[in-house]
Image: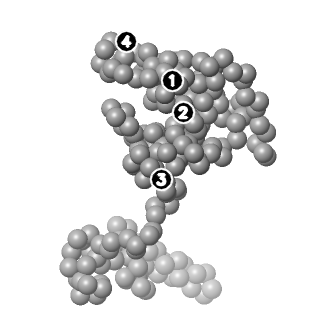
Amino acid sequence: MKSLFTILLIAFCMIVVSCSDKRERNYQYFPDMYESVPYDTYGAYDIFQDEQEAKIPEEGSISRGFTPYEYDDDPDGYALAKAELKNEVPYTEENLAKGKELYAIYCATCHGDNGKGKGYLVEREKILGVPSYDDQGRAITEGSVYHVMWHGINTMGSYASQMDSEELWLVDHYVMKLKAELEGQEPREFESESE
């Protein structure tokens, strides 16, 4: 009798399992979790404030990972950045190597490998008037180099969309190294990461 009951129970379980549709879920206790209501990005719906699904970011909000740059793109902003702005990325051998790599990608085609303003495009006369980093009339500083990379100047466009803030500072380190070499200065001492 006991074995007959076990056989009937197994048969019943097999019938129940075999009747389910394997392409769909069996039971949905909270169907909104499985089948959400789709909203078009720019659609007008009563449940949203101002009946608009896509919202404008709050005043003063910034994108995650973005560092705002406070200096204006004008002569006063340039002069202020030239005087005040300092590179806070440690001057280490590793950071200088990264800066050299980025410089070779983004800068050397115009400014040259040594910073004399005789890059590939200048030699082919595609771009004219690229000054050397040791040009006394410009007297570049860490701040002025960063400002120019951020905003661009004359025919040089901004590199803020191609490199993040730290990468711009790494290139800044390498540009200042090239400037020191062109002026015959002693190489700068490397810092430790903790400094």
First in residue order: circle 2 vs circle 1: 1
First in residue order: circle 3 vs circle 2: 3
Q: In which quadrant of the rendered image does the C terminus lie?
A: top right
**Residue type, numbered disc 3:** Tyr
**Residue type, numbered disc 4:** Glu
For numbered disc 3, what is the local secondary structure?
loop
Q: Is residue 94 above or below residue 120?
A: below
Residue 156 x, y percent position in the rendering: 37, 33
Q: Nearer the viewer, residue 94 or 29?
A: 94
Residue located at (33% from left, 20% from top): 128
Q: Can I make out residue 104 in this image? A: no
**Residue receiving disc 1:** 135
Pair 1/4: label in front: 1
**Residue receiving disc 4:** 123
Q: Can I make out residue 2 in this image? A: yes
First in residue order: circle 3 vs circle 1: 3
Q: Dividing the picture into quarters, in which one does residue 50 lie?
A: bottom left
First in residue order: circle 3 vs circle 4: 3
First in residue order: circle 1 vs circle 4: 4
Mark 4 to mark 2 CA distance (whole Å): 23 Å
Q: Nearer the viewer, residue 6 or 177?
A: 177
**Residue receiving disc 3:** 71
Residue 53 x, y percent position in the rendering: 28, 76
